[in-house]
Image: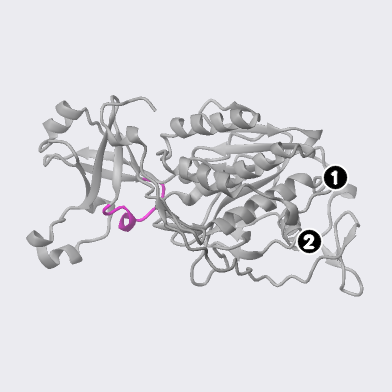
Amino acid sequence: MSYSPKSYEIDSDYLLSKLLELLSIHSPSGYTDPIVRNVCATLDELGIEYELTRRGAIRATLPGTSGSPDRAVVAHLDTLGAMVKELKSNGRLALVPVGTWSARFAEGARVSIFTDDGIYRGQVLPLKASGHTYNEELDTQPIHWDNLEIRVDERVYSQQDLIHKCGFNVGDFVGFDADAETFPNGFINARHLDDKAGVASILAAAKYLVDNKIELPVDLHLLFTISEEVGSGASAILHGDVAEMISVDNGTAAPGQASSEFGVTIAIADSTGPFDYHLTHHLIYLCQINELPYSRDIFKYYRCDSASALDAGNDIRTALVTFGVDGSHGYERTNLHSLMSVAQLLVAYATQRPLYAAQVHSLNSIDTFPETRKTDVDGARLVEPDGIQQVPPEPTGRIEDPGPPVERKRSASKPKAADSKRGNGKQ
């Protein structure tokens, strides 16, 4: 049976609830075991088989009618965060960031500090935090991690208090609350949408494929990495027979960028260079023939799991599919419209035959190597590399208006209860 995204009824309630669930679990790079267990439980519920790497990355598989060449989609479970750099004499904790992000967006955040024996709560503040004490000096402080400290919500006023009363150590992980808030018009505000929104989109697409018992042409691997924010994400997770990999991550909706919080954005290149021409244009083609709203973009200061996979020596085609995020690596915002569009594109991709089925082996002859996509003589048809001609709708490159919002009360998510109590070392 042939499927079109126009008929895909992705479960938006499932996607949103799964996203809020993921956002409630702290997972800074290096402290990802709790969220790995959560996603494994979700895969169990969906009946999808999976395995774990030694470090805890997840490799799940939706089997196809043919085992090779395999394809994969990948998103990362780890987020930005921090670690304790110093136990200070004033009873506060100095910080060092995990991942690359500005101290500007850490100020004022509520956090959980994970010690060897339990979890404590606190707040990130600048060194001069009292307006009544420092007056205008507050506004002249430098924006830097060296200028921040955690005020712990315990009776600790010295370094010895931190050590003996709470058991803090240098290297304790610090998780920043997502502070997720959703709105009836589809907007979602939260930290860590990068990349938990991508994970939720993949899981929603997988749920659709499983629930509808859709037969896939080849094996599809769902990969969930745990160290993307520190650069090594997909370096050791790929199966050897994977020929194509789609990274799902955030696109930067900002002045000078083409990404949008509505529809899907296909990245053409990032800071490491262009993505695979053929796979990227195949995704654009799928958007066109299935009337999915899309845009193209280039990210100058960006790196994703595709780069770490290629750096590790994998001979694969890679592409990047993104959901639009305003304020990336800060106070982030996206829209459910974009996440649904990503899930629909993933289903469309999964149900199509491999881009180059002849390239089963890693080394091939020139006879099976593809040509660059071109138009035929009258310019009316796109000629696919295998010679099959298709007539897509006229692409506009513009994002469709999702329509007026429906008036409802807004809702806000809260941190898990375990994170608001100390002395609970289990996750």
Q: Is residue 399 visible?
A: yes
Of the two numbered discs 1 and 2 in the rendering, the one whose residue sits closer to the viewer: 1
Mark 1: which secondary structure? loop
Disc 1: which residue: 1
Q: In the rendering, which numbered label is found on residue 289?
A: 2
Q: Is residue 205 above or below residue 189?
A: above
Picture quadrant of residue 158: top left
The amino acid type found where label 1 is placed reads Met
Query: Which SS type dominates the magenta stretch?
Result: loop
- Tell me where residue 47 sits by quadrant: top right
Horizontal and vertical percent for residue 15? 56, 46
* Distance CA(mark 1)–CA(mark 2): 17 Å
The residue located at (82%, 38%) in the rendering is 360
Left-right relation of 342 to 354: left
Q: How is the image coloured?
A: one colour
Residue 420: in magenta span: no
- Give the residue at x 84% y 43%: 357
Q: Amino acid at mark 2?
A: Ile
Residue at 54% x, 62% y: name it.
261
Q: Nearer the viewer, residue 198 or 271?
A: 198
The residue at the far left in this view is 133
Give the x, y percent position of residue 369. 84, 50
Q: Is residue 198 left or right of residue 359?
A: left
Up-down: is 327 above or below 312?
A: below
Label 1 crowd (10 A; few <14 / some 14-19 / many >=20) = few
Q: Bounds of the magenta span?
A: 98-108
